[in-house]
Image (cartoon, rainbow, N blue to C red):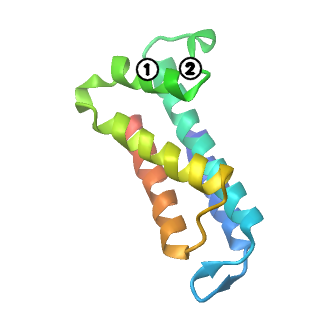
Amino acid sequence: MKEPTRYINNAKELLKKSPIENNIYTDVKYVKSALGVAYLGVLDAINEALLKKGLTRKELPKKVEEYEKALKKHFGVYNGKLLREFSTLYDELHIAGYYRGLLHRTNIVKDALKGAEEFIEKIRR
């Protein structure tokens, strides 16, 4: 699973391009891009894990609801924890971070990236 980690590393590199003033990223373009790339890393990690479980590329989820169903079906051993983490990452990285551009504080953005990294590590197991 090299690709999901590459996504996270690319996201961190994008964040470095944004100036910081008073612990706030001032260039929303880089923050949005970084969080979008991190979310793609999360999706890629799920895809790779599903492929290892025997799904074909054609069977991989295409929508967030399909990812949620796949997590329930194939990773139920986590008792819903993985699904909750994915839903949180979707809200933080994709909706608030990338789509709406609402995240600016350095600690919040870095925590979101850390959450993505932790999720990727869990899904690798």
Q: Secondary structure at mark 1?
A: helix
* Quadrant of the image occupied by residue 61: top right
Look at mark 1 in the image and give the residue it sits on: 70
Q: Residues within 10 Å of mark 2 (few under 14, many from 20)?
A: some
Q: Residue at x 40, y 51 (%)?
A: 118
Asked if 49 appears above or below 43 in the picture, the reply is: above
Quadrant of the frame with the C terminus: top left
Amino acid type assigned to the residue bearing label 2 in the image: Pro
Percent x, y for residue 44?
A: 58, 34
The tag earlier along the polypeptide, 1 or 2, is: 2
Q: 76 left or right of 45?
A: left
**Depicted 53 relative to depicted 4: above or below:** above
Q: Real-space Cα distance between discs 1 and 2?
A: 7 Å
> Label 2 belongs to which residue?
61
In the image, what residue type sits under mark 1? Ala
Of all residues, the one furthest to the bottom in this rendering is 22
Taking the spot 49% from the left edge, 31% from the top edge, the residue there is: 46
Residue 24 in picture, x, y percent from top left: 61, 80
Q: Residues within 10 Å of mark 1 (few under 14, many from 20)?
A: some
Q: Quadrant of residue 11?
A: bottom right
The reply to whether callout 1 and callout 2 are in contact (CB within 8 Å) is yes
Q: Position of residue 49 (x, y in %)?
A: 46, 26
Q: Residue at x 47, y 47 (%)?
A: 89
Looking at the picture, how far across and down is residue 40, in whole percent? Answer: 62, 41
For the question of whether residue 48 can be seen, the reply is: no
User: With respect to residue 65, does 21 lie above or below?
Assistant: below
Q: Which mark is residue 96?
A: none
* Residue 34 vertical placement versus 104 (above, below): above
